[in-house]
Amino acid sequence: MTAEASVPVPTDLLDLARSIAIRAAGSALDARRAGVEVAATKSTPTDIVTAADRDTEALIRDAILEARPDDGIVGEEDAARVGASGVTWVVDPIDGTVNFLYGIPAWAVSIAVVSGPPTPDAWTALAGVVVNPVSGEVFEASAAGGARVTSTDGSVRELAVNAGVPLSHALVGTGFGYSVERRREQAAVVAALLPEVRDIRRIGSAALDLCALAAGRLDAHYEVGLNAWDHAAGALIAREAGAQVSGIDGGSEGSALLVAAGPDLHPDLCAALRAAGLRA
């Protein structure tokens, strides 16, 4: 049997991703309630890792390999695992670690499942789940299966991006990198873009921003410097809710730039970002 033929249908992968993400979210929330300290830093002193990041990713990896031992895994806190099945799991154990550290209720467990090479310009996203452990909301999507959110009371709502929003009325989410020079450049773009839109939000979790776009809580999101695990699940959820997700010139989203918005707003936002000096 070929690797491609052995790939389960996306709904089966979604069920497994949801189960693992909800379990991991509960574990991370328990860790947060017990108290959090910085365990290490990465690219800069402000780019932090907590013990909960590492423990949550280990829990997720173990659960994936128990269920699907031939799959690959790309995660934030541990080395990539090359699989033999053609399926790769793209994992962010805690997206929004600074929010997690400070007790701001905007952090998430993000798990995506993709086929093909594990890079955004080459993979096919099959399923994605983003869980906000504090609110209890579970955002999810499968390829060609639509996007939805389940609330703590068990109610399920289908997601759709806002339509017919002009740039001047758009509420736009974004995020900032960790290096001083990148932040300086990003601040200049925000200063130029702000007069052109309704307002800008910096919530601190790209995964939740993309889900907010899908849910109509934001009209758009753009960000430079995202890693694959930051946006893999959220981008699928946004797309299945009707968003256009790409780079600034229409190619695949990636670390250079991700721009996500409703299809009528997307080209105007890209033009405004270029006018603001953003290049990818």
Image (cartoon, grey):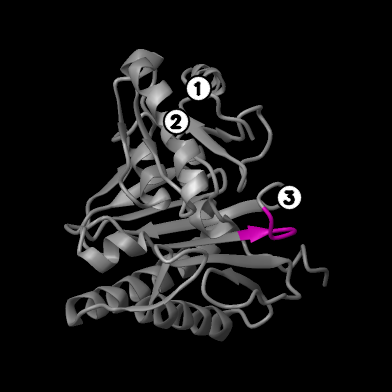
* For marks 1 and 3 on the same chain, the one whose residue lies earlier in the sequence: 3
Q: Nearer the viewer, residue 271 or 185?
A: 185
Please give the name of the residue rendered at 46% of the width and 77% of the height, measured from the top-left corner.
57
* For marks 2 and 1 on the same chain, the one whose residue lies earlier in the sequence: 2
Indicate which label's residue lies in the foreground, 2 or 3.
2
Q: Nearer the viewer, residue 238 or 179?
A: 179
Apparent side of residue 29 relative to residue 238 in the rendered image (left or right):
left
**Spatial CA span between label 1 and label 3:** 29 Å
Where residue 108 sits, quadrant-wise, is bottom left
Q: Label for residue 152?
A: none
Q: Which residue is mark 2?
A: 188
Going by the numbered disc 3, the residue's amino acid type is Ala
Q: Label for residue 122?
A: 3
Q: Which residue is mark 1?
A: 276
Q: Which residues are magenta?
A: 114-119
The answer to whether the residue labelled 2 contacts the one labelled 1, judged by CB atoms less than 8 Å apart, is yes
Which quadrant of the rendered structure holds the C terminus? Answer: top right
